[in-house]
Image (cartoon, helix red, strand yellow):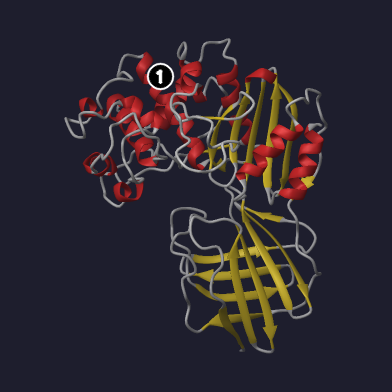
Amino acid sequence: MSVGSFIDAVQEQVDALHSLVFLKNGEVVAEAAWHPYGLDQPHRLFSLSKSFTSTAVGFAIAEGLLDLDDPVAKHCDGRGDPRLLIRHLLTMTTGHVEDPTNLATAKTDWLDAFLAIPIEREPGTHFLYNTGATYAAGAIVQRLTGQRLVDYLRPRLFDPLGFGPVVWEQCPLGRDVAGWGMSATVREIARFGQVYLHDPDGILPPGWAAEATRKQVDNHNDDRPEVIDWQQGYGFQFWRCRNGAYRGDGAFGQFCVVLPEQRAVLAMTAGTNDMQTVLNLVWEHILDDLEPAPAPELALRTVPGGPSTVEGRFEVAAPRRLNPHDWRPSHEQVPTIRAVTFSPGRIVIEDATGTHEHPYSHDTWVRNGLTAATAAWTGNDFTLKVAYVDGPFIRTYRGHLDGDELTLNPSDNVSFGPTVYPPVTATRVTD
């Protein structure tokens, strides 16, 4: 098998990978991006951000600011359960029975709210995926250093690894949210994995890579088969994998997979709900592939159909909100559609946040800032796809034109909430 066969299998089975970089012995074996995404386009990492927060904790420990076995309360003005230690935050063994993240982030001070949530089990005895714990670890580093995580990591990690500008979302009090919210390019993700695999320049604190990525706790807490890669153990904000590998990962297919036995790193960005299939294909196709491969020209699928001469403006009489849990392209809620305007090669959608122009082609993706669009018509039916190229989300608008009435059916490829929304009806406006 090979990187090429992996790409072919991904094309067939996964919709869709956005970019990948495969390193062997620190050298690029293969790299590819699916147009309209790019190798140097920062992409939202979601929970892959956690592995960077873990790294910040490692630096803080090496600099004597805290210790793995420090009580969390020691660094939080005495707040929090006295049994809760820094290592419990990193291993997600805080003792909570239910993930406290939503409760904590509903308040203004997320750290204070997290520490006030009762702990039902003995810390250290039970794994529960817990982004609030990551936020708490990051918040403590920021309290101790007086810096945002992105600024603390800049001279210690980002600059040595050649990162460009790094964006990290902030909580209401101005702290980087730690458990998600960071963006990086796929090439930067690969360099991050490489420094954990092999660090000849001593960028990371001595011993931290081995300690953070080994199995610290068992995470097989349910009845799912043990063969899946979310049941192989958990380190300090890193997952253990099958085949002796470990990884950081984020929602919808953001991966930094490190394969020590192969001396290899695979970084990927994506927009898929089926992350296990991606890893299955990694194990099937590239464990033994060590040869360089040419970078193929790839693109996301377009939609069937052709161009159209349809023109005109259609207004919605009673706009409705599509999805209150939207994450595109920021934390703002999905806006209300107010109007749609067609002209050759361009569709304009107006909503509560403004006017969004989508130049498109029926046979390729057309970039327009941080969005890209493709659209095609078949008779009176059209499909418009809008990709938000700084993340995994693609919105699809399927429409039908019946005289002066337009029916629009929006949906999303992936979402933290619904992916299919009620139809929107608009009427042609005539001068």
Viewport quadrant of the C terminus: bottom right
Residue at x-position 26% and y-position 28%:
72
**Residue 299, x across and y down, in percent:** 76, 49
Viewport quadrant of the N terminus: top right
Q: Is residue 147 visible?
A: no
Residue at x-position 82% and y-position 29%:
293
* Between 292 and 355, the one nearer to me in the picture: 292
**Residue 362, x across and y down, in percent:** 78, 64
Q: Quadrant of residue 276?
A: top right
Extreme left residue here? 78
Horizontal side of residue 30 vs 72, given as left or right: right
* Between 199 and 280, the one nearer to me in the picture: 280
Q: Is residue 181 visible?
A: yes
**Residue 117, x across and y down, in percent:** 24, 43
The residue indicated by pointer 1 is 59
Q: Secondary structure at mark 1?
A: helix
The amino acid sitting under disc 1 is Phe
User: Local crowd at mark 1 within 10 Å, few (<14), some, or many (≥20)?
Assistant: many
Q: Quadrant of residue 304?
A: bottom right
Residue at x-position 53% and y-position 35%:
231
Q: Is residue 121 above or below residue 154?
A: below
**Residue 393, x across and y down, in percent:** 58, 54
Q: Is residue 243 above or below residue 39?
A: above
